[in-house]
Amino acid sequence: MKKLSFKLLFSLVVIGALMYSCGGNQETDEVTEEVAEEKTTEEVTYMLPSPLQIVSLFKNAGLEYVGGLTNVKENVNIYNSKTAQKLNFGVYAADMAYSITNNQTQEAINYLSALRQMSEKIWMTDVFNSAGVAERLEKNVGNQDSLTSIMADMQMEMDEYLEENGTSYTGSIIFAGAWIESMYLALNSNKNSSEKIISRLSEQAIIIGNIIGAVKQANENKEFDEIIASLEKIEGSFKSVNEDSVNTLTPEQIEGLKVMVTEIRNNLIKG
């Protein structure tokens, strides 16, 4: 069985290199029993950017803050299944990143509170305690650079915590929720048709394949079938970018992607 290792990367250049790298050479000689045994324990590492990176990518392309788009904090009480809790932990992480990158400090603190409540449900309270996130946020109100650094630290703490506790697969589910929310925010902004935003949206064709691969590796009990189907549906919208060597999506494709992602995201936050 392959072992899943989920990593958050803090260099998009590294991500690009890894995503296009080739696997090992196929063996044509007879495979010995010993080598076969080694292959069954092969570790597959999916390299994905953090929610903060995705939101920052869109922000730097001109994404503006639009009030009322993010998931309401009160919804934290309606997520009862573990899958819904993990996915919406990711949603709230993206919403917190969206708030921080747009200088909405009080919103960021409110979303931190939602994340702490969610962390209790998925047994990740140690991430917040060890990073001292709440105290650091309150001390750095108004300092966007510091707030961004604090969230990056929190995400690194989460990655390390999940790996140390043998639950790396949880990270892939969290990131799936964060990515869907980030795409939703970008597609529903008042500048989603700008050339830079369209370019950044089109680049997500590179990311989504790795997200699907990571979630599939975590799906031994078939509990993530629904989110995989949703992600594969979104992936279909990137067909022209992935297969036809087209650099960017057309305005019509962007509109279709917007409708699809919005529907999937709204169903996701319903729990």
Image (cartoon, grey):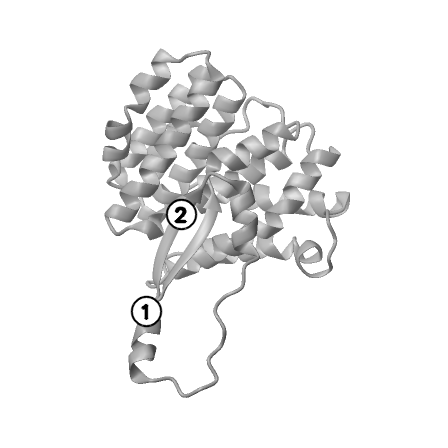
Q: Quadrant of the C terminus?
A: top left
Residue at the (65%, 31%) spot, across then down: 61
Which residue does the numbered mark 2 point to in the structure image?
Answer: 7
Residue at the (30%, 42%) spot, across then down: 160
Q: Is the residue 72 above or below the residue 248 in the image? A: above
- Along the line of sight, which residue is nearer the eye, 225 or 62? 62
Residue 165 visible in this rendered orientation of the protein = yes
Please give the count of numbered marks on the rendered protein.
2
Q: Is the residue 65 above or below the residue 261 in the image? A: above
Q: Label 2: how many residues lie within 10 Å, few (<14), some (14-19) or many (20+)?
A: many
Residue 11 is tagged as: none
User: Left or right: where does residue 223 sit relative to residue 250?
Assistant: left
Dot 1 amino acid type: Met
> Dot 2: what SS?
strand
Residue at the (34%, 63%) spot, across then down: 220
Q: Label 1: how many residues lie within 10 Å, few (<14), some (14-19) or many (20+)?
A: few
Which residue does the numbered mark 1 point to in the structure image?
Answer: 1
Residue 193 visible in this rendered orientation of the protein = no
- Along the line of sight, which residue is nearer the eye, 186 or 10? 10
The disc, 2 or 1, on the residue closer to the chain's N-terminal end is 1
Dot 2 amino acid type: Lys
User: Left or right: where does residue 203 sit relative to residue 118?
Assistant: right
